[in-house]
Image: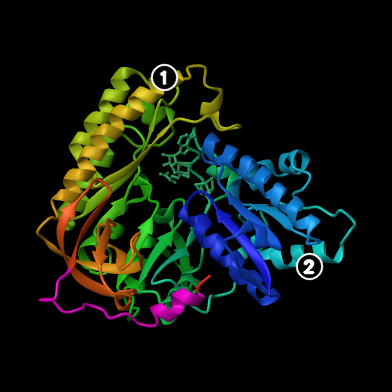
Amino acid sequence: MKKLYIKTYGCQMNVYDSEKMATLLAPLGYGLTETPGEADVAILNTCHIREKAEQKVFSDLGRLNMVKKEREEGGKDTIIAVGGCVAQAEGEEIIKQAPYVNMVFGPQTYHRLPEMLAQLLRSKGQDLRIVDTDFPVESKFDHLIQPEHSNVSAFLTIQEGCDKFCTFCCVPYTRGAESSRPVDAILKEAEHLVRVGAKEITLLGQNVNAYHGSMNGKEWGLGRLLYALAEISGLERIRYTTSHPRDMDDALILAHKEIPQLMPFLHLPVQSGSDRILEAMNRKHKVDFYIDIINRLRDVRPDIAFSSDFIVGFPGETEADHAQTLELVEKVNYAQAYSFKYSIRPGTPAGIHEWQVPEEIKDRRLQELQTLLFQQQKAFNTSFVGQVIPVLFDREGRHEGQLMGRSPFMQSVYVAASERHLGAIAHVKIDKATQNSISGAIDTTESVLSPANTFAEAKSKAV
Ligand code: SAH
Ligand code: SF4
Ligand code: F3S
């Protein structure tokens, strides 16, 4: 069997795409390997969101080239491919800078991988290099293959691209215009995933709640789609990410009250706590609007927990703006959050702004923000000590005899338990909390909520 190595950077949509790439290449005889030295085909599925992510790709490419040379000495060919968002943004540049790269394709063209690969293999020795960074009319989703097995916690992309053009962000350029998959295609994929082992599905989109799919000529929003998904028997947990505050409509908020499978945890990025900066970012809402949504969600689902993304040091951000971000964090009280220093993205409006914030100020603001966020995260985790909560075990833990799972609130939960609990939802009594995780023991006074199904088997075969 030929070997395929895929390294995935960036967001969950890239994770979904990488899984699909592996499924597309499996019929051509490619099995996955985690060792680049074994790979006949090596794909880097890249992310362009911040400069660091991009730099990492170029250094990893250099390393792959060394591997390619070593393999060459042993008489073996290696095809190196770059996919994803860096490929989309800098396809031609990659080809110029890295002559050993054979194939470059964007997030909307990877369904053509088998064809591209076949072309390369046919051209053997002719130094063919393929760049496919179209935004094709046909949808890649119509060409993807469903997997034979699913992880117990699966991703399902329902929406792609973005039309919001936040001034700091490259996504509208790398992923293209916003588009939603039809309702029936999503329901079919979800039913299939559950049939082959999934108990939890996370719906994905760069603006997942801007979803507006069609069903029998009618338009469905994300709220309506969630009700339909909740009808699927065996689908025990539903999540969605990433949401934009402006697209949290009434139906979606109500879904959080009425759908028990919808987990009480929402990633709702706000980026900044300053109205002035939100405007400069083109987020098109004010801080009060965001707080109002948080309050409305808490009204319908009192135990709901929140996470967010923050950017510090956006061009023109003052100490007063930064203080307002800290104030907002105090007000909301997050269970968890991601925070980043503003990073210039070529071609975006904020990148050419004259008031760039010096690096040391960004460092200090990031540290202040993270200190506060980490305190909140630790306090959130600590509040579970002594409680019994349902945990979906989806992988082995860091230590022998340990499993890791997720709480309804996306916390990592570590428990000493046998493999037979993999893929099961069981009650866990929490006895310890740190900033990053909680741990405890399976509560034997409560029965196992949902026994493991074919997960153990699925895990060994999953791509
Ligand atoms: N669609 C999502 C965000 C997707 S990008 C939303 O609108 O919330 C993921 C996160 O990366 C963003 O929320 C933002 O916090 C961060 N990010 C995007 N561009 C960035 C940049 N140029 N510099 C630093 N962080 C950035
Ligand atoms: Fe980027 Fe803004 Fe679109 Fe999110 S909404 S992907 S931050 S442009
Ligand atoms: Fe990165 Fe592209 Fe996702 S830029 S965050 S991989 S959409």
Q: Is residue 26 left or right of residue 301?
A: right
Magenta-colored span: 442-461
Q: Which residue is mark 1?
A: 360
| Vertical order, 255 against 82 (above or below) | below
| Residue 96 rendering spot, x and y as whole percentages | 77, 39
Are the residues flagged by discs 1 and 2 in contact, CB closer than 8 Å?
no
**What main secondary structure does the magenta stretch of the protein show?**
loop
Report whether 83 appears left or right of 454: right
Label drawn at residue 118: 2
Occupied quadrant, residue 392: bottom left
Determine crowd level at label 2: few under 14, some 14-19, many 20+ residues with C-alpha closer than 10 A.
few
Q: Quadrant of the N terminus?
A: bottom right
SS assignment at label 2: helix
Left or right of 396? Residue 431 is left
Q: Nearer the viewer, residue 10 or 439?
A: 439
Cα separation, mark 1 vs mark 2, equals 50 Å
Q: Is residue 460 magenta?
A: yes
Residue at the image point whose x is 39% and y is 82% from the top: 454
Q: Residue at x 15, y 53 (%)?
A: 299
Nearer to us in this view, 31 or 261: 31
The answer to whether any part of residue 316 appears in the image is no
Which numbered disc flags the more N-terminal residue, 1 or 2? 2
Label 1 SS: helix
What kind of residue is marked 2?
Ala
Asked whether mark 1 and ligand 1 are closer than 8 Å, the reply comes as no
- Where residue 42 sits: x, y (%)? 66, 58
Residue sitting at x 29%, y 47%: 307
* Residue 172 in picture, x, y percent from top left: 55, 44
**73 inside magenta stretch:** no
Give the percent coordinates (x, y) of residue 436: 28, 48
